Image (cartoon, helix red, strand yellow):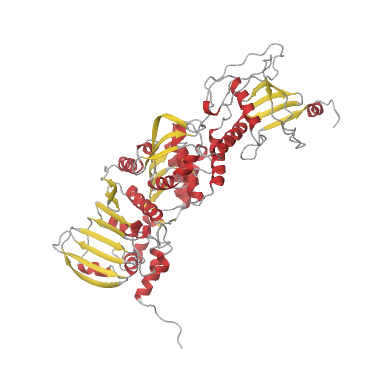
Amino acid sequence: MNRIRILTDSVANQIAAGEVIERPASLLKELVENAIDAQARRIRVEIRGGGKSLIQVTDDGHGMSRDDALLCLERHATSKIRDSADIAAIRTLGFRGEAIPSMAAVSRFHLLTREPDTAVGTELEIHGGKLLFVREAGCAAGTQVAVRNLFYNLPARKKFLRSDATEIGHLHHVFLLHAIAQPRIAWTLQYDSRIVHELPPASDEPQVALLARVRGLHGPQLAGELLPVGFERDGVRIHGLIGKPGLSRSNRSELYCFVNSRPVDSRAVYYGLIEGYHTALMRGRYPVCFLFVQVDPALVDVNIHPAKREVRFREDARIQGTVIEAIRRALGTNVPAPIGVTLRSQPPQPQPPGIPAGMPTIIQTVHPPSIFPPQIQVPFQVMAAQAQGANLHAPPIANRDSQEQVPRDNTGSLTLLGVFADLYVVAMDTGGLIIVDQHAAHERILFEQMMNRLGRESAPSQRLLLPQSIELSPRDAVDLRAHVPLLESMGFGIAEFGERNFIVDALPPFVKIETLAQLLRSIVDELREAGRQVNRDRFAEETVARTVCRHAVKANDTLQTEEIKRLLMDLHACSSPFTCPHGRPTMLRLTQAELEKKFGRRPE
């Protein structure tokens, strides 16, 4: 008995749909690319039920004749290429001839099309790969494709689709990619009879057009933090917009890369981006950018995967080098000093009386503005002042060598000596010298204060004098909206104010107002990585640990005497005062015995 048989066209198309049409967003991508290749000037996208009920794309491109409309339903039928030589220099977005028959095989497919120079158009309907009718119809010039009930005849595939909100997020991302890639095309996006985006065609000048499109999609806040890129070398042209240093994400969600106006993933381009930023970008962070690479089509291979998302360059090093140079030139002198560091020239400090010239001294500088918000200040009872400082109730200090700890209830007086290198607080008690890392200590204080607030039903918040409006990308807005209750429990006051806007009228006391937009973006990234079924305590610990690191006092943040006193008292009040949330020590002790060994007064 023969075991090998040829599959029917219907089954073959359903199998092929598994590669080409993974989810509604894949279907939208193919339809939009066809509209762009048809030289459309206006593209309208309508979505219902997360794309599972309806995805309809209407364009005013060159349309199709009756014969072409029927022929496009056949596998490997395309107008983009004709022979093998064309594969080596593909200039269109689509070329494989698989998308239309694949989507027609797994949905209720409706096509309406007319060429501009004909009086009558063509209408056809296909259900599950079976042609129901084809007839003449009156319609506007261009093409309209409506795909309903996706995977209705493949229940096994349909059950793998996610919720409507998740699928809408993917659909919106596809729309954003192509709207950014084609700013000269007018775009309209409609969800369930509601207009979400209505973007007019932008200027003919590429850079101006791109900036206008980014402003229309992402808002003026993000657009105002971008720098233009324009560089060409050895036949490779780089242009677009990149974020200023300090504007970054913890993932690649806002890293848009286009090769010959095709949205792609490219390791060569990503490597060039990261290397171009170099020290202007924190390790583990990703830039915000809208980067276009124009190169000879013969030097790039887009025929790697049916989704055409990945590309391969013939000379990766050439592309990388050009991207690196373009990024460095764009940053130029716009690279600011790192946040928290003030570049200043300090006059020589006078030598204290009684200290021989040339001897090192510990000098505490005073910085007028307080870096501690009033809401986290703990009342501090000043003890009798002494000539060298003030006596404080000191926390027990861990001996780093012996790992022995003084019992917590045996607190004595601590004499503050000063601050070394604007980072290390130096003090002493009867047991020896104590050195406290002000950054690590402040991290621990903020971490425990925030975690204690999360343990209560109502977390304290600091009301803003003027509520601040934050505009997020559509994908970020969906994720933030789902986790507003969690953020409210952390002390944020957040309310929706439109499709992608949120009003923030209250903050946890430790958050600095100027970092609010970046902070929300970072929290959204971490929420997305953790998933929707995130454990509140685990997420809170990891998020707060990362957040307080960014907001704790840094090296070169000079403190007033009262601030140092408060820092030490707050550290003493912590349940785990000896390490920061990342495990680094907050303080070290040099005992009298260790000092005597160093000076040869005690045998080793």
- Res 68 seen here: no
Q: Is residue 271 left or right of residue 503?
A: right
- Res 543 seen here: yes
Residue found 30% across the figure and 68% down from its top: 77
Quarter of the figure with residue 53: bottom left
| Near-viewer residue (391 or 463) | 463
Q: Is 114 situated above or below 410?
A: below
For this orientation, the residue located farthest to the right is 603
Total numbered labels: 0
Residue found 50% across the figure and 39% down from its top: 490
Q: Position of residue 159 (x, y in %)?
A: 42, 64
Q: Is 131 situated above or below 173?
A: below
Quarter of the figure with residue 204: top left
For this orientation, the residue located farthest to the top is 353
Q: Position of residue 469 (x, y in %)?
A: 38, 35
| Near-viewer residue (7 or 293) | 7
Quarter of the figure with residue 381: top right
